[in-house]
Image (cartoon, grey):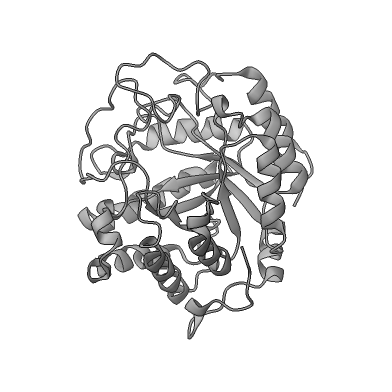
Amino acid sequence: MRDPEHSPIEEGLPSRWTPERVTAWYERLPWPLGCNFVPSTAVNPLEMWDASTFDPETIDRELGWAADLGFTMVRVFLHDLAWRADAAGLLARFDRFLEIAHGHGISTMPVFLDSCWNNYGFAGPQPDPIPGVHNSRWVQSPHPKIVVDRRLWDPLRDYVQGVMQAHRNDPRVAVWDLYNEPGNEGLVTNAMPLTAALFRWAREVDPVQPLTVGIWNVAEEFRPLNDLQILASDVLSFHWYEGIDSTRRLVDQLAVHGRPLLCTEYMARSMDSEFATHLPFFRDRGVGALHWGLVAGRSQTYQPWFSQPGDPEATPWFHDVLRPDGTPYDEAEARLLREVSPRSGAPSPN
């Protein structure tokens, strides 16, 4: 993983932020502590943002619980199909979300594209979850056939730039996450052109917020893609669902680039990725920490990744922190989150 001075995708565009600029940005933030958020009433981002199922009451209630746990930031997924179906409506509902989150003292990291889970998405009302199955209705954005065919990218550019133009100066948006786990649909090398295009499109907008695409797989086949993500991102982000020893090693490898670090996915209890081991380390190193899941709901991410239809509730839960009534799954976890949070009065490690 290398960090050359200049990224080739930046020719003729605003430059990637310098380490000094992005460090100054990071030091102005409260330490990023939070989660990947989808309301418990939504089975996927399409259900979260559709006019018929957008649920600001639940969002308000659950983000209130997030604030009580000490969270300062949430990561939320948008979707290209929601834009294609109703661009103005998506913008209005996203603005309402930002208003709610900001009212609870929480900033937002929006995610535009996503290579994970199912590839049969459609706009409008979504099917019910498959009982027992983790993220049974989560859908990729865009469809894999669009990823590999640049003739189909114009609507994606309109989507990304349309949302960013509306919020390029918005202090409620903390950072733009352009692409969740590129290549996870099996298109590792094919994901590189679209990843580079996303950075070009975002640089054309020139937002006041930094850009990132997170490292999520360090296998050799991902090295060219990881290098692109590192050399193009302002702030470096990563996903890691392993034990604390390998987490330390990855943080050490990424820290040599001299940029702030955000762990934007972690915490899978049955994989030795837990709050008790990871949160103190992230806080001591000043690494932002956003785990997966808040309230157990229709996404069913308390079940493990490879759960099967009809499986009983997992023990322990895989992700998620709160039961549907807002009570913690584990009181000790809730206490630790509050103790390390800058909202509790603890000094920020930034």
| Residue sitting at the far bottom | 12
Q: Where is residue 36? Give x, y as percent.
A: 49, 40
- Residue at left offset 61%, top offset 72%: 17
- Residue at left offset 23%, top offset 36%: 126
Q: Is residue 125 above or below residue 314?
A: below
Horizontal arrangement in the rendering, residue 236 relative to residue 125 (left or right): right
Residue 348 shows in this picture: no
- Residue at left offset 67%, top offset 54%: 29
- Locate the N terminus by quadrant: bottom right
Q: Where is residue 217? Give x, y as percent.
A: 51, 49
Which of the pair 253/169 is nearer the observer? 253
Q: Where is residue 64? Give x, y as percent.
A: 53, 33
Which of the pair 96/145 is nearer the observer? 145
Q: Is residue 47 above or below residue 87?
A: above
Total numbered labels placed on residues in the image = 0
Q: Where is residue 223? Give x, y as percent.
A: 53, 60
Which quarter of the picture shows residue 52? Answer: top left
Residue 183 shows in this picture: yes
Horizontal arrangement in the rendering, residue 24 relative to residue 62 (left or right): right
